[in-house]
Amino acid sequence: MMKKTFFLFSCLFLLSACQKNNFSIYYNDENIDRQEHPLAKKSFVKVIETTDLSERFQEYKNQGYILLGSAHFIDEWTARALAVDTAKEKGATVVILSSTKVKEAEHNYVLTIPNPTFSHYSGTVGNNRYYGTSTSYSYQYVNQSYKTNIYEQLALFLAKEKK
Protein backbone atom coordinates (compact mmCIF):
# COMPACT_ATOMS: atom_id res chain seq x y z
CA MET A 1 0.00 0.00 0.00
CA MET A 2 2.81 2.40 0.89
CA LYS A 3 4.53 1.84 -2.47
CA LYS A 4 1.32 2.63 -4.34
CA THR A 5 0.87 5.82 -2.36
CA PHE A 6 4.42 6.98 -3.12
CA PHE A 7 3.99 6.08 -6.79
CA LEU A 8 0.72 8.02 -7.09
CA PHE A 9 2.23 11.00 -5.28
CA SER A 10 5.22 10.96 -7.63
CA CYS A 11 3.00 10.82 -10.72
CA LEU A 12 0.90 13.75 -9.51
CA PHE A 13 4.04 15.74 -8.78
CA LEU A 14 5.42 15.11 -12.27
CA LEU A 15 2.14 15.99 -13.96
CA SER A 16 1.62 19.19 -11.99
CA ALA A 17 5.04 20.67 -12.74
CA CYS A 18 5.03 24.17 -14.19
CA GLN A 19 4.68 24.16 -17.94
CA LYS A 20 6.83 26.36 -20.15
CA ASN A 21 4.98 28.63 -22.56
CA ASN A 22 6.00 27.30 -25.98
CA PHE A 23 3.67 29.81 -27.66
CA SER A 24 5.82 32.66 -26.30
CA ILE A 25 9.14 30.84 -26.74
CA TYR A 26 8.51 30.05 -30.42
CA TYR A 27 6.55 33.21 -31.26
CA ASN A 28 7.53 34.74 -34.63
CA ASP A 29 6.46 38.37 -34.93
CA GLU A 30 5.21 39.62 -38.31
CA ASN A 31 6.51 43.11 -37.40
CA ILE A 32 3.26 44.90 -38.24
CA ASP A 33 3.57 48.68 -38.16
CA ARG A 34 1.00 49.56 -35.47
CA GLN A 35 0.87 53.19 -36.71
CA GLU A 36 -0.01 52.12 -40.23
CA HIS A 37 -2.30 49.29 -38.98
CA PRO A 38 -3.94 50.36 -35.70
CA LEU A 39 -5.64 47.45 -33.92
CA ALA A 40 -9.11 47.26 -32.40
CA LYS A 41 -9.01 46.52 -28.67
CA LYS A 42 -11.00 43.73 -27.02
CA SER A 43 -10.93 42.51 -23.44
CA PHE A 44 -11.02 38.82 -24.34
CA VAL A 45 -9.23 36.41 -26.66
CA LYS A 46 -11.14 34.01 -28.89
CA VAL A 47 -9.47 30.58 -29.24
CA ILE A 48 -10.25 28.40 -32.25
CA GLU A 49 -8.95 24.83 -32.55
CA THR A 50 -9.12 23.53 -36.11
CA THR A 51 -7.84 20.85 -38.47
CA ASP A 52 -7.87 23.29 -41.44
CA LEU A 53 -5.70 26.19 -40.34
CA SER A 54 -5.40 27.91 -43.71
CA GLU A 55 -9.17 27.92 -44.28
CA ARG A 56 -9.90 29.40 -40.84
CA PHE A 57 -7.13 31.98 -41.29
CA GLN A 58 -8.61 33.04 -44.64
CA GLU A 59 -12.07 33.43 -43.04
CA TYR A 60 -10.69 35.84 -40.45
CA LYS A 61 -8.49 37.65 -42.96
CA ASN A 62 -11.62 38.30 -45.06
CA GLN A 63 -13.24 39.83 -41.94
CA GLY A 64 -10.44 42.39 -41.57
CA TYR A 65 -8.10 40.54 -39.21
CA ILE A 66 -4.35 40.73 -39.70
CA LEU A 67 -1.67 38.24 -38.71
CA LEU A 68 0.45 39.59 -35.85
CA GLY A 69 2.58 36.49 -35.44
CA SER A 70 2.70 32.71 -35.25
CA ALA A 71 4.22 29.94 -33.18
CA HIS A 72 5.25 26.53 -34.48
CA PHE A 73 6.82 23.80 -32.34
CA ILE A 74 6.92 20.05 -31.70
CA ASP A 75 6.60 19.13 -28.03
CA GLU A 76 4.27 17.70 -25.43
CA TRP A 77 0.76 19.18 -25.36
CA THR A 78 0.89 22.84 -24.38
CA ALA A 79 -2.11 24.24 -22.52
CA ARG A 80 -4.28 26.57 -24.59
CA ALA A 81 -4.41 29.02 -21.69
CA LEU A 82 -0.75 29.74 -22.48
CA ALA A 83 -1.72 30.67 -26.04
CA VAL A 84 -4.20 33.14 -24.54
CA ASP A 85 -1.44 34.59 -22.33
CA THR A 86 0.76 35.07 -25.40
CA ALA A 87 -2.13 36.61 -27.36
CA LYS A 88 -2.77 39.16 -24.60
CA GLU A 89 0.95 39.96 -24.43
CA LYS A 90 1.12 40.55 -28.21
CA GLY A 91 -2.23 42.36 -28.58
CA ALA A 92 -3.99 39.54 -30.45
CA THR A 93 -7.73 38.97 -30.04
CA VAL A 94 -8.00 35.68 -31.96
CA VAL A 95 -5.79 32.60 -31.79
CA ILE A 96 -6.24 29.87 -34.38
CA LEU A 97 -4.65 26.60 -33.28
CA SER A 98 -3.92 23.31 -34.96
CA SER A 99 -2.17 20.25 -33.57
CA THR A 100 -1.25 16.81 -34.87
CA LYS A 101 0.09 13.90 -32.84
CA VAL A 102 3.58 13.08 -34.10
CA LYS A 103 4.72 10.30 -31.78
CA GLU A 104 4.66 8.87 -28.28
CA ALA A 105 7.64 9.40 -25.98
CA GLU A 106 8.61 7.28 -22.99
CA HIS A 107 10.24 8.94 -19.99
CA ASN A 108 12.12 7.09 -17.26
CA TYR A 109 12.91 8.15 -13.73
CA VAL A 110 14.01 6.59 -10.46
CA LEU A 111 11.64 6.68 -7.51
CA THR A 112 13.35 6.69 -4.10
CA ILE A 113 11.30 5.02 -1.36
CA PRO A 114 12.46 5.43 2.23
CA ASN A 115 12.19 2.40 4.53
CA PRO A 116 12.32 3.58 8.15
CA THR A 117 13.45 1.29 10.97
CA PHE A 118 12.35 2.23 14.48
CA SER A 119 14.30 1.15 17.56
CA HIS A 120 13.20 1.48 21.20
CA TYR A 121 15.68 1.62 24.07
CA SER A 122 15.25 1.46 27.78
CA GLY A 123 17.45 0.65 30.71
CA THR A 124 18.74 1.71 34.07
CA VAL A 125 21.82 3.69 34.99
CA GLY A 126 22.25 3.72 38.76
CA ASN A 127 18.82 4.48 40.16
CA ASN A 128 17.65 6.25 36.96
CA ARG A 129 15.57 4.62 34.21
CA TYR A 130 15.79 5.89 30.65
CA TYR A 131 13.66 5.42 27.55
CA GLY A 132 14.38 6.41 23.98
CA THR A 133 13.70 5.79 20.34
CA SER A 134 15.70 6.18 17.21
CA THR A 135 14.87 6.00 13.54
CA SER A 136 17.22 4.96 10.76
CA TYR A 137 16.47 4.80 7.07
CA SER A 138 17.40 2.58 4.21
CA TYR A 139 16.22 3.33 0.70
CA GLN A 140 14.75 1.33 -2.09
CA TYR A 141 15.19 2.59 -5.65
CA VAL A 142 12.48 1.71 -8.16
CA ASN A 143 12.72 2.43 -11.88
CA GLN A 144 9.50 3.95 -13.23
CA SER A 145 8.38 5.13 -16.64
CA TYR A 146 5.50 7.00 -18.18
CA LYS A 147 4.47 7.87 -21.73
CA THR A 148 3.48 11.20 -23.21
CA ASN A 149 2.25 12.17 -26.64
CA ILE A 150 4.29 14.59 -28.74
CA TYR A 151 2.41 17.02 -30.98
CA GLU A 152 3.24 19.36 -33.80
CA GLN A 153 1.44 22.55 -32.75
CA LEU A 154 0.83 25.70 -34.76
CA ALA A 155 -0.82 28.91 -33.57
CA LEU A 156 -1.74 32.03 -35.52
CA PHE A 157 -2.24 35.24 -33.54
CA LEU A 158 -4.65 37.72 -35.14
CA ALA A 159 -6.16 41.11 -34.37
CA LYS A 160 -8.78 43.13 -36.18
CA GLU A 161 -7.55 46.25 -37.83
CA LYS A 162 -9.30 49.44 -36.70
CA LYS A 163 -11.20 51.09 -39.53
Image (cartoon, rainbow, N blue to C red):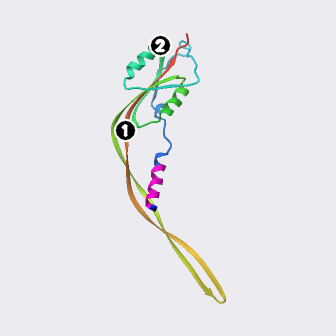
Q: For the residue marked with disc 1, what is the amino acid?
A: Ile
Is residue 32 positioned above or below 107 on the image?
above
User: Residue under circle 1?
Assistant: 150
SS at mark 2? Answer: loop
Mark carried by residue 125 = none
Amino acid carrying label 2: it is Gln
Q: Are marks 1 and 2 in contact (CB under 8 Å)?
A: no
- For the image shown, how many numbered marks are present on the structure? 2
Q: Quadrant of the C terminus?
A: top right
Q: Which residue is mark 2?
A: 63
Q: How crowded is the residue under tag 2: few (<14 C-alpha within 10 Å), some, or many (20+)?
A: few
63 shown above or below 130: above
Residue beneath the point at 59% across and 24% down: 43
User: Which residue sits at x=50%, y=17%?
Assistant: 32
Q: Main secondary structure of the magenta part?
A: helix
Q: Pick whichever of labels 1 and 2 is earlier in the sequence.
A: 2
The quarter holding residue 151 reads top left
Distance between mark 1 and mark 2 Cα atoms? 33 Å
Q: Is residue 51 left or right of residue 24?
A: left
Q: Is residue 158 above or below residue 5?
A: above
Quarter of the figure that contains the N terminus:
bottom left
Q: Is residue 92 magenta?
A: no
Farthest right residue in view: 127
- Image location of residue 134, percent across then percent down: 55, 73
| Residue 89 locus on image (x, y percent) | 55, 28
Which segment is the magenta one?
Answer: 3-13
Residue toward you, 16 or 2: 2
Image: 19 above or below 54:
below
Q: Is residue 10 part of the magenta span, yes or no?
A: yes
Furthest toward the front, the residue is: 1
* x 37%, y 51%: residue: 145
Query: Residue 131: where, in percent of width, then height?
Result: 61, 79
